[in-house]
Amino acid sequence: MLNFDLEKLSNALEIDRDKLLQYLGLQTLYGRYLLKTENIRFELTQSFWMRVAMGLSLDEINKEESAIKFYNVLSTLRFVSSTPTLLHSGLTRPQLSSCFLTTIKDDLINIFKCLGDNALLSKWSGGVANDWTNLRATGAMIKTIKVESQGVIPFLKIANDVTVAINRSGKRRGATVAYLETWHLDYEDFLDLRRNTGDERRRAHDMNIASWIPDLFIKRILKNENWTLFSPEEVPDLHHIYGKKYDEKYVEYEQQAKEGKIKLFKVISANELWKKMITRLFETGYPWMTFKDPSNIRSPQDHAGVVHSSNLCTEITLNTSEDETAVCNLGSINLEKHIVNGKFDEQLFENTITIAMRMLDNVIDINFYPTKEAKNSNFRHRPVGLGMMGFQDALFKLNINYASQEVLEFTDSITEKFSFYAILGSSKLAKERGTYQSYKESKWDKGIFPLDTLDLLEKERGMPIEVPRTSRMDWSIVKDHVKQFGMRNSNTMAIAPTATIANIAGCYPCIEAMYSNIYVKSNMIGEFVVINSYLVEDLKKINLWNQDIIDQIKFFDGNIQKIDKIPEYLKKKYKGAFDIDPEWMIKVGALRSKWIDQSISHNVFMKGVSGKKLNDVYISAWKSGMKTTYYLRTLAATQIEKSTLDAKKFGYTQKRDHLFENESNNAIKVEEIEKKECSISADPECEVCQ
């Protein structure tokens, strides 16, 4: 770092950019990111941005010019790197990557090696995903010692406790997710991991869990057919194949089970298992629903291996194997900063994306890798995950309602531009630096781009993918460039939750609708009241920002739909996520997904307890070709008491009216839920918990 011209870089600092930070952003930087020794901070905000930029410029030929270029993008909040990059860039051990994905073998030595890897990866601020499907089920014979296995669950308990023991870099809680395919014989026990009842030795309260769902399972649900659970050592290839090949092999194994050639199996109703999955998802928030076949069929790297799981936040879909721990390097474009004078600035957008792609690619070479498997994977494939945030801010500034037809056009258009410039940016880097090692025979090499893969999935699935294939840009420009120069990165885009960096940037996280117009964010730094400043400004314009309106907004927990004095056009504009149909949100998410080569952290927000509605939402996600979904967010049945309100006017106890719909086929009954703020416990990656 001392090899930089420090005087030149100092002169490039723009101190006035401190004013771009809101209180929450500044407090977040102060509490977690600014460098300190013995609790004395020796870094200010603009030197912090420059330190990050310098760390990402170490291998550049024109280091000072690159650092200034990177600084200008970061300090103006047009692009913000992920938390590990912000924490460690320019330090002696620059672990800059966000996500690590491992596949665990059915071998005791490998199991505990991977648990040790979890600890190392978590120590350096990585979010960890483990694929556990290879492990034999409860009751399977361990031939070497002639005893029956206890299955997957006891090892998941250990993984949970490893997670609890790690405080990532002293600044983030450890965070791990376990994935299991829905045909595993221990899958029903897996569903209960986060329950608050039962044997505590078979519970994992601090770890996330996710289902890895093959297409055949959903087809069986739709046809009301049976489903068979197996132990992996008797069906060793099922986890490593997908599509029609998987369907054929699965049916073959079912026949073998009928003939007595397979010892351990269980035949159940696919619908009953699905109902249990939906019920557990509502009760505990877990396991998340992620889809195996679209993740593999649509992968640019299907020639190089199998995607065995997603990551901690379900936006990464990369190959894993015994010698490859998948790694992804993240950062997000802030859409809000690209709405200039009431219009979207495409030229600025292209410039930001081009610079961001260079920064992300630089991470791979500069990075400190806690394990050799992580280094192997990253240097072979060089994946990055450019994301976006501030989508809701952009809608507010453009006066587009999230629950309107107009949002479909904007989403499709903006994500197409995002994809166009990200892929072109990677190809331009390939022209300068060369292609990644495993480029040959990839989908990129064959001229197959993300939009094209919807047709591949449709053909393999044998069912229509309900997403329009509309495009607006001249993709021949990008395809010709890739054909001539290749790609620098196997994967380019992944839309992560952006919980903390959105706090820093002062925008709404990820691509989601606003959570509420007023709520409290709680993280390791403290608790912060968040108020929708766009709503405040609009109310001021019509002289409606007064104490009476403020009290009513507080009373309704930020939901303005029941406040009579607020005009209808503002009610539509400022609908919270819980007032928008989750199936509509899936429709919007599917339009994004068609352009993305990895996936999206797509939360499902739902008001009420309708099991039928939950079923429809997740089946809709599958039908639209989405690869993954993230948390299920449910709304509280009661309000917190508000000591600042006039009790004579608002009452001593506040209750919402008719919050829950009452359907006869509910998977979960209303009386089971007395109070439910969020379906999850505190999670460092969760924007609601943040």
Image (cartoon, rainbow, N blue to C red):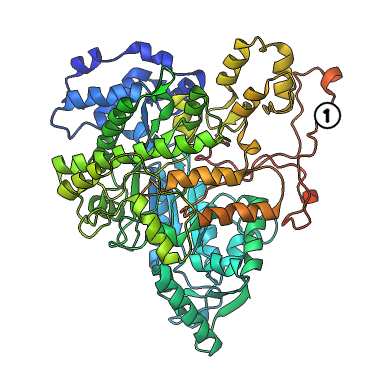
Identify the residue under disc 1. 653
Q: Say whether residue 91 is visible.
A: no
Image spot of residue 247 (x, y percent): 46, 73
Give the quarter of the image for residue 634: top right
Image spot of residue 565 (x, y percent): 73, 18
Quadrant in which the N terminus is drawn: top left
Q: Nearer the viewer, residue 372 or 543?
A: 543
Image spot of residue 317 (x, y percent): 39, 53
Q: Is residue 231 above or below residue 476?
A: below
Categorize mark 1 by other alpha carbons within 10 Å: few (<14), some (14-19), many (20+): few
Give the quarter of the image for residue 553: top right
Quadrant in which the C terminus is drawn: top right
Residue at left offset 43%, top offset 58%: 294
Give the quarter of the image for residue 71: top left
- Please name the amino acid that badge 1 sits on: Thr
Q: How many marks?
A: 1
Q: Secondary structure at mark 1?
A: loop
Residue at left offset 68%, top offset 20%: 567
Q: Is residue 51 above or below residue 13?
A: below
Q: Say whether residue 301 is visible.
A: yes
Q: Nearer the viewer, residue 163 or 646?
A: 646
- Name the residue at the top extreme: 543
Q: Is residue 419 left or right of residue 361?
A: right
Q: Nearer the viewer, residue 266 or 623?
A: 623
Image spot of residue 113 (x, y percent): 38, 60
Q: Is residue 641 above or below residue 244?
A: above
Residue at left offset 64%, top offset 41%: 678
Q: Is residue 587 above or below residue 527?
A: below
